[in-house]
Image (cartoon, rainbow, N blue to C red):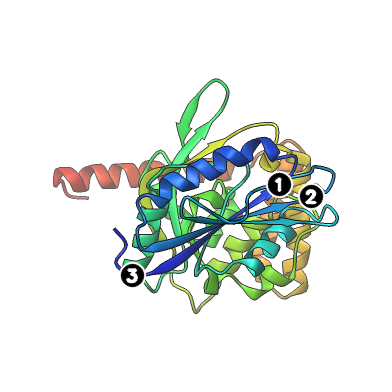
Amino acid sequence: MCKVDGCISVIVPLYKGKKYIDHIITNIQKNKIHLHKCKIELIFVNDDPSENIDVQTQKNQGIDIKLITNLNNIGIHASRVKGVKAASGDYILFLDQDDEISEYFLKVNYEALLKASDRPFTICNGVIEHLNYKRPIYTNRVMQLMAQKVIFYALFDNRIMSPGQCLIKKKAIPEFWMCHSLSINGADDLLLWIELLCNHNCKSPKLVFKRLYVHKNTNSNTSLDLSNMYSSVDEMILLLRKYKFSENVLKVFEYRNDLLKEGRSNVSVSLLYAFIIRIAYVYRKRKKTGKRV
C-alpha cells in the first residue's frame, strides 16, 4: 500500500488502436486496486485522425481518462510529448497500445521510486511474447544491469525493450527530448534513455528484477520495422551530433547501425557480449557458493 499521495500518468499513443482501448483500461483498473492513495490518470493520444475514437473522459473506476486527438499524424515521439504536456502526474508510464503490464506493475515501481527517491526512473524485467514462444527480456541480472550504462546501448542494442518497462519521474524527463521530436518512428525511446543516462545530475535508474511487463510482438510494433528503425537511429545520431553529444559514443552507434543496415553483425562485439555474460554468470555462481573468485 502506498504511504503517500501521488499521481501516475499513463500515456498511450494510438494508431489504428481503437480495438486495444478496452483492454488497456481494464489493465490499468486492475493496477488501481493496489494503489489506494495514489491517483492514476490514463491519457490516450490518437495519432490517426481518420479513426474516430470516443472514450468516456470522466472517472472510470478510480481512473481519470483523457483523450487527445491529433489534427494530423505527427508520430509516436511527438504524441508522447503531447501526453506528457497534458499529464498532471509526477510519474509517467509510456505504454504502447498493445502492451500489457502486471496488475502489480504500478504499485511495485511506484514504491521502488519512493524508497529510492534520488533515482530518475525504474527498469523492470518482463516477457517478450511471439506467436510461437515466450522468453524473458533479461535472462539474468547482468543483462539488466547493462541497462544502467549508455555505452552498452551503443555497443549491443537498446537495453530496454520498451518504455513500458519503466516508470519515470516527470521532472527527470529531459527538456531536450521534449523539444526535439524525431520525425521517423522507432528511436525516440533510445534517445530518451541516452539523455537520462548522460545527465550528470541524475543517478542510475532503479532496477526492479520482477517480471512485470509483457511486450507483444505484433504487426503494429514499430520496433519490428527494421528499415524504419535504422533510419530513426540515423536521425537520432544526427540530432545528437548537432548538439555536441560525445562523438566517440556516436561513432559506435553509427558503426553498429551501418552494419545492421547492411545485414551484417560485428563478430567481435557479439563475442564481447557473450564473454561479459559468461564472466558475470561464473562470478555470481561462485559468490553464491562461497568459492574464491
**Based on the displayed image, in which of its 4 quarters is residue 38 positioned?**
bottom left
Across and down, in percent, residue 280 comes to 35, 47
Q: Amino acid at mark 3?
A: Val
- Quadrant into which the N terminus falls: bottom left
Q: Pointer 3: what residue?
A: 4
Q: Is residue 52 above or below residue 163?
A: above
Q: State the image coordinates of residue 285 (x, y, percent, origin top left).
A: 24, 42
Return the mark for residue 54: 1
Mark in the foreground, 1 or 3? 1
Percent coordinates x, y for residue 60 in the rendering:
52, 51
Callout 1 secondary element: loop
Mark 1 and mark 3 lie on one chain; the one further toward the N terminus is: 3
Residue 90 as seen in the image, left or right of residue 238:
left
The structure residue drawn at horizontal position 58% and vertical position 39%, both measured from the top left corner, is: 22
Q: Is residue 202 above or below residue 218?
A: below
- Residue type at mark 2 is Ser
Residue drawn at 49 percent across, 47 percent down: 28
**Secondary element at tag 3:** loop
